[in-house]
Structures are given as C-alpha cells and as structure tokens.
Image (cartoon, grey):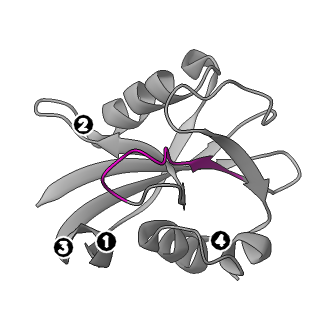
Amino acid sequence: MAELATALLILPDGRLVFQRRDLGIAIAPGMLALFGGHVESGETAEQAIYRELAEEISLDTATLTVELMCDYRIRHLERGNEEYHYNLYRTNVPHADFEVYEGSGAEVYTAEEVLRRDDITQSTRYAVTKHIGG
C-alpha cells in the first residue's frame, strides 16, 4: 500500500488552494488535487509533506507550519482500486500568489465551491468533505 502526505493549503480568509494537475500525467490528468505526494523510504509523513511542498510551490517551507489533521485509507477508482494511506496536513499560507513547480497552476476555492466541481480527485473530495465540511 502506498503512503502519501498531502496538505490542505488554507488562506487567511478560509479559502483553499488546490493544485491543477498536468494534462500529460498518467493519474488524474487535469484534475484539481491537494498538494503533496508519496512518503519515501526512510522519511516520516511530516518530512515528506515539507519536502513535497518545497518541490511543488515557491513558498518558503521554513516559514510554514504543518499540522496533522488525520490519516485515512481510501481505494482509488482512478488508480485501479488500489488502497492508499493518506496523511492529511493543514497548512496555513499567507497568499496564493506563489509559483507552482509541479502541475499547471494553483486555483483557489471555498470548500463549498470546490465540492460542486466535477474535476477534483477522489482523495481531494474526501479530504474536503470529511475535514473541512461541505
């Protein structure tokens, strides 16, 4: 089972920042997703989320604080029904005006707005529904 570390990036006004996935990738191309990725061998989930954020966005991760909200397991329809273990972190960010290094950009929505969309990944929908509300 793959283990992932993901982050809900939360702006001061409570809106959420999501990553738009590249169109050319194998899994969930073009979909809105959480920032983050796989926990590598020998690292903790917290180390992984800091590494992933440093790889994916231009914000100085040394100034960010991550707080573990929960961990959960879900089976991904878009990944052959394979089970994944998620570590979901909350990360307050000062603004959404940052460069995105992985994916095709960042988009900002309220929880209610994003849950009305049909272009979000299954894991993103689960995280927002269960841990932010909507």
| Residue 84 in the figure: left or right of residue 14 | left
| Residue 120 in the figure: left or right of residue 134 | left
Tell which circle, 1 or 4, labels the residue nearer the N-terminal end.
Answer: 1
Kindly report which numbered mark, 2 or 1, lies closer to the viewer in this rendering. 1
Q: Mark 2 to mark 4: distance in Å?
A: 24 Å
Q: Mark 1 to mark 4: distance in Å?
A: 23 Å
Say which amino acid is labelled 2: Thr
Please tell me how crowded label 1 is: few (under 14), some (14-19), or many (20+) other residues with Cα within 10 Å. Answer: few
Q: Which disc is residue 132 wearing?
A: 4
* In magenta segment, residue 116: no
Which residue matches tag 1? 78
Please tell me how crowded label 3 is: few (under 14), some (14-19), or many (20+) other residues with Cα within 10 Å. Answer: few
Query: Answer yes or no: do the residues labelled 3 and 2 have beta carbons within 8 Å?
Result: no
Report the magenta residues as a range. Answer: 17-27
Say which amino acid is labelled 3: Gly
Q: Which disc is residue 44 wearing?
A: 2
Q: Which disc is residue 94 wearing?
A: none
Tell which circle, 3 or 2, labels the residue nearer the N-terminal end.
Answer: 2
Tell which circle, 3 or 4, labels the residue nearer the N-terminal end.
Answer: 3
Tell which circle, 2 or 4, labels the residue nearer the N-terminal end.
Answer: 2
Kindly report which numbered mark, 3 or 4, lies closer to the viewer in this rendering. 3
Count of residue discs: 4
Kindly report which numbered mark, 3 or 2, lies closer to the viewer in this rendering. 3
Up-down relation of residue 127 to residue 16 (above or below): below
Main secondary structure along the magenta-highlighted residues = loop
Residue 8 x %, y %: 58, 53
Say which amino acid is labelled 4: Ile
Which residue matches tag 3? 80
| Residue 69 in the figure: left or right of residue 58 | left
Say which amino acid is labelled 1: Glu
Secondary structure type for disc 3: loop
